[in-house]
């Protein structure tokens, strides 16, 4: 393929994400995206197997989202959120709260998932401090976790298998426990650290970037009970699992366990504009309610609650409300199971896992085909490469057609063959 001139002229200036520039193939030049397909500069179309890092739940270029963002652009594209308010955010917050169980209704908007997790940690640590529990400075996290790329969130990621090993020991003080499994001693291990912990954080049901590792509802029930017993706040990072990825509006609904704080992002705007949030209970909010301005939550990103992003989120929520996404995901789950389970007997394959619209094939480290092997078969698939395993996964737009899903499955089948 002849690379477009903007790619050749710009490539020595752009630092790509998670990229070893010395050995990486050049990126695929994308000139448009519609539905579940990426349009490349040479006219080829690829079915997107990973929905732009799991954001594009409704596919690309959805006319309803585009119309709402365009209308917002004509009215108010941005205004600082300090001392000023705007309708898109003030109507989005109650709308999000209405989707959540219990009194999870204090919504703090930010621009990325990592920052939402940072804010959740600040809510937990600062509220413990302000309640006089100044010894609670630790965070309990889990092996296999991924919570972002900023310093505090890197400290929560798996310290051995994750990509942020070089930063071990920096950021917040985190303790990593194995996800509770039947017959283990989780409660005892939790109790060892619980007295010094402000919160525990977990990606409920699926640890995504850490290898699409899945656990059951009971693990979350045990974690909830342990947190309650020791006065530790429970944070669910639903940045990847939220908005029907597991089949329910949030994984917390599927599991029937309610946290004290939830982080959301990614599919919130349907992959259109950056927006995320940390959403806390009234009880946590009340720890900041005081006459002293210094006891306020000390955070406020410049672009927080950007009106265009909030308009995109409203449109995305409209679509979730109008379409039967639970049924769509149940269908995808069955198709993914049917398509991926036969791969279990292929060379280097160690495990096949499916939950909701997430299908993963775990392979020996260093054995997963490169993205190019999928692209030549019409699919965009980007395996996760961890120290302990390669994981080839599909997390397509939730609206993907049977034909496009078949193409992804066939590409995977052929590339692994
Ligand atoms: C569970 C989880 N938390 C946090 C993040 C970080 O989000 P962002 O990339 O928007 O900072 C991700 C991103 O993949 C994620 O999967």
Image (cartoon, rainbow, N blue to C red):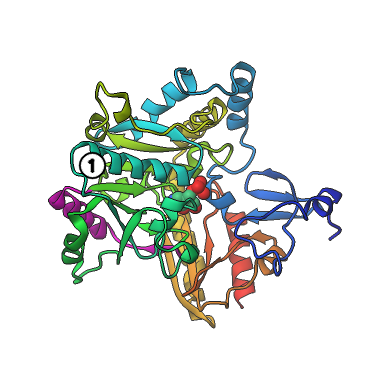
Quadrant for residue 321, please give it: top left
- In the image, is 273 to the left or to the right of 83? right
Q: Is residue 380 visible?
A: yes
Q: Relative to the observer, which residue lies in front, 353 or 194?
A: 194
Relative height, residue 87 to residue 166 (above, below): above
Relative height, residue 204 to residue 303 (above, below): below
- In the image, is 228 to the left or to the right of 269? left
Q: Would residue 230 be counted in the magenta stretch?
A: yes
Q: In the image, residue 141 lies at what x, y percent?
A: 32, 58
Q: Quadrant of the N terminus?
A: bottom right
Q: Would residue 345 be counted in the magenta stretch?
A: no
Q: Residue at x 49, y 33 (%)?
A: 301
Q: Residue at x 47, y 71 (%)?
A: 341
Quadrant for residue 107, please give it: top left
Relative height, residue 58 to residue 203 (above, below): above
Q: In the image, residue 176 lies at what x, y percent?
A: 32, 63
Q: Main secondary structure of the magenta part?
A: helix
Q: In the image, residue 134 lies at what x, y percent?
A: 21, 45
Magenta residues (range): 210-232
Q: In the image, residue 389 lies at what x, y percent?
A: 49, 74
Disc count in the image? 1
Q: Is residue 240 visible?
A: no
Relative height, residue 417 to residue 209 (above, below): below
Say which residue label 1 marks.
Answer: 128
Q: Residue at x 37, y 45 (%)?
A: 250
Q: Relative to the observer, which residue lies in front, 166 or 358?
A: 166
Q: Quadrant of the C terminus?
A: bottom right
Judged from the image, the secondary structure of the residue bearing numbered disc 1 is helix
Residue density around tag 1, few if under 14, some if 14–19, many if 20 or more, within 10 Å: many
């Amino acid at each position: 393929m002849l690379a477009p001139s903007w790619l050749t002229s710009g490539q020595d200036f752009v630092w790509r994400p998670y990229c070893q520039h010395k050995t990486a193939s050049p990126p695929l030049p994308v000139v448009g995206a519609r539905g579940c397909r990426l349009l490349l500069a040479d006219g080829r179309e690829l079915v997107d197997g990973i929905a732009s890092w799991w954001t594009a739940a409704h596919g690309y270029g959805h006319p309803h989202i585009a119309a709402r963002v365009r209308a917002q652009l004509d009215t108010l594209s941005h205004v600082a959120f300090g001392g000023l308010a705007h309708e898109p955010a003030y109507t989005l917050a109650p709308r999000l709260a209405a989707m959540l169980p219990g009194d999870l209704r204090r919504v703090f908007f930010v621009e990325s998932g990592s920052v939402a997790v940072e804010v959740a940690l600040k809510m937990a640590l600062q509220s413990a401090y302000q309640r006089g529990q100044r010894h609670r400075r630790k965070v309990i996290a889990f092996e296999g976790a991924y919570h972002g790329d900023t310093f505090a969130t890197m400290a929560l990621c798996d310290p051995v298998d994750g990509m942020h090993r070089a930063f071990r020991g920096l950021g917040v003080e985190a303790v990593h426990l194995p996800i509770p499994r039947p017959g283990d001693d989780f409660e005892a291990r939790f109790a060892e650290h619980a007295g010094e912990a402000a919160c525990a954080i977990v990606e409920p049901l699926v640890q995504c970037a850490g290898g699409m590792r899945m656990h059951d509802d009971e693990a979350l029930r045990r974690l909830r009970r342990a947190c309650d017993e020791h006065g530790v706040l429970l944070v669910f990072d639903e940045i990847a699992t939220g908005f029907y990825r597991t089949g329910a509006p949030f994984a917390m609904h599927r599991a029937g366990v309610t946290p004290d704080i939830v982080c959301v992002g990614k599919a919130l705007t349907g992959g259109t504009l950056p927006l995320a949030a940390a959403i806390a209970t009234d009880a946590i909010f009340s720890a900041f309610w005081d006459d002293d301005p210094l006891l306020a939550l000390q955070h406020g990103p410049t672009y927080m609650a950007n009106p265009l992003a909030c308009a995109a989120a409203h449109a995305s929520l409209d679509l979730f409300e109008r379409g039967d996404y639970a049924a769509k995901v149940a269908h995808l789950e069955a198709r993914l199971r049917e398509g991926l389970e036969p791969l279990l007997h292929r060379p280097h394959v160690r495990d096949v896992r499916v939950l909701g619209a997430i299908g993963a094939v775990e392979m020996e480290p260093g054995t997963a085909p490169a993205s190019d092997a999928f692209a030549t078969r019409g699919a965009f698939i980007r395996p996760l490469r961890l120290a302990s395993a390669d994981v080839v996964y599909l997390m397509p737009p939730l609206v993907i057609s049977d034909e496009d899903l078949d193409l992804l499955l066939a590409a995977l089948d052929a590339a692994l063959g």
